[in-house]
Image: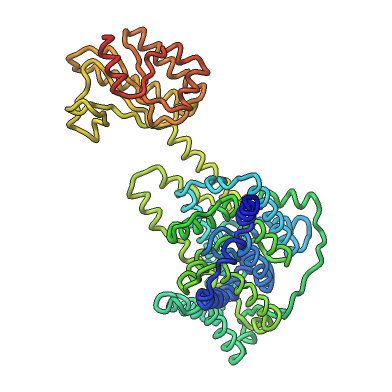
Amino acid sequence: MKNSTNGSRGLTRWVPITGWLPRYRRSWLTADLLAGLTVWALIVPEAMAYANVAGVPVQYGLYAVPLAVLAYAIFGSSRQLFVGPSSTVAALSAATVAPIAVSTGTNPIVLTATLALVVGGLYLLGGLLRFGFIARFFAKPVLDGFIVGLGIFIVVGQLPKLVGVEKSDGNTIRQLISVIGDLGSWDWLTVGVGVASLAILLILARFLPRVPGALVVAVLAILVTQVFDLAQHGVAIVGPVPTGFKFVPWTGITWDTLVDLLPGALGILIVGFAEGIAIAKAYAEKYEYRIDPNQEMLAYGAASIGAGVLQGYTVTGSLSKSAAADDAGGKTPLALCVVSAMVLLTILLIAGVFEHLPEATLAAIVIAAVYGMIDFRKLRRLWDAHVVDFWLAAGALAGVLVLGILPGILVGVVLSLVLFIHRLDHPHIARLGRSREDTEFGDLEEHPRFTEVPGVLVLRFDAPLIFANADAFADLVADAIAHAQVGAETPLHAVVLDLEACFEADVTGVDALLRVARVLEQRGIELQLARAKAPVRAALEHLGAETTIGKDRVHATIAAAVEAAVHTS
């Protein structure tokens, strides 16, 4: 019985649907059906619009849905997250595929589907190797800047379709200048259709948020186009959309092609996973349960492979669809199964009705969908805080707009590392005082009523003691000693170093500590250590520092270290 239980738990861990489906309550069914229908009404027009962003015909946006959302329903650990077509990964997919398609002549549809399979394979490998931490490759301020830049990139990329002009080459800034410069060539009927579609979308989102605005606008645009024969008056339409699956041959893919796709696939994995896991964590906190980042990688992998098998583009978590399902009362991933079935029926029965959909309306749907990404309030908050994070966020934003998406990802990763190293290289050291009752020690800046111990300088180092900040540590201790000796009535004879906040020490850090100890000894000042954690104690012991400093000078509490310093004065 015990083995059976353990086996069941193991299966639930790897296939979460086996955990929640047997406990499914019939009372949840109506809410999940409604949530599924709500998301279906959103996903059909948006998936087609994002296909335009990905650079493939609109029907392949629909193809990306059925197996992808079903796979996440089976393997995902989040009960609220919707994993499916996303403007973010669609743009990343296009940026990866376009140059390869031009250089090799391979069908972009095949390249896009292959990219989804490669991304899915990388996700599976990452999940099995427990690489869920990869979401941290982007520091949050850098990710915020990158997402704002990506939103602007996508919007500017849709403007030519919105106004009826050809899309120019160059980065986002050049494309925007080109669209504005082509004002005399704008097709004003197309502008009218696009602006009207966008206005309706924004109004519905503002005043009737539960109404599936994208579907409403798509249906209205199709009707208006047919009634007034707008295609004959210069308004570009989607054109023939096959009902049923119409796949292209899987040809032109070589090992060299897979290697060329790999950098873009890694970029999609990092950005897509960071975006999706943030949404999943938000809902997990809201409903008080835990998600497993490594299991999420496996689920994203299965979803992307599901999308690629049907020649769709890669997928990730979507905030708008997740929010729509949650607002509609969705209880479980069964809502995703409903979406899968409904989109499959759409492909098999009614996909052809979208052939009269204006391209300008698709552009408006994309712009309305990504509008929320362009949130400058996040950057303003960093600016108001006067922190270095703002400049890193601005750098990530500029990287996307000036260099492009894939180089922008590299800029984001590099800036995240710069932020990490900057934080390590600028550690905080606190000068501690003692309470009147002599029972506790605290930062003098936080506890102005605490007093210093005469002749003893008590410092707390609030960072790991490693190569990145070893020199800074030595400098901070030297500065603190110099400051303490200015105007002091009692000569300084001891320094107590509180290491409670120091959770790690490497060779370089320990060497810096020994260097400080030697300098203090030469000046007749003894060094006492307090509250060193087990990993730090182990490093001190293995590197011989504990013996050099003296085991009797390593104490469990600050009070014990101070008492030893006072008694040996």
Name the image quarter holding the C terminus.
Answer: top left
Question: Residue at left 47%, top 69%?
Answer: 326
| Location of residue 242 (image quadrant) | bottom right
- Residue 149 percent across, percent down from the top left: 50, 56
Q: Residue furthest bottom?
A: 227
Q: Is residue 145 visible?
A: yes
Q: Position of residue 311 (x, y in %)?
A: 72, 66
Residue found 44% across the figure and 23% down from its top: 471
The image position of residue 244, as x and y in percent, is 73, 78
Q: Is residue 128 above or below residue 199?
A: above
Q: Position of residue 388 (x, y in %)?
A: 40, 42
Q: Nearer the viewer, residue 199 or 279?
A: 279
Is 480 placed left or right of 548 in the picture? left
Residue at 70% across, 57% down: 115
Is 132 drawn above or below residue 116 in the view shown? above
Q: Is residue 454 above or below residue 200?
A: above
| Left or right: 209 as drawn, with respect to 332 | left
* Residue 196 in the image: above or below residue 488: below
- Of residues 325 and 309, which is closer to you in this image? 325
Foreground residue among 534 and 36: 534
Foreground pick, 301 / 250 = 301
Spot the residue most to the front.
1
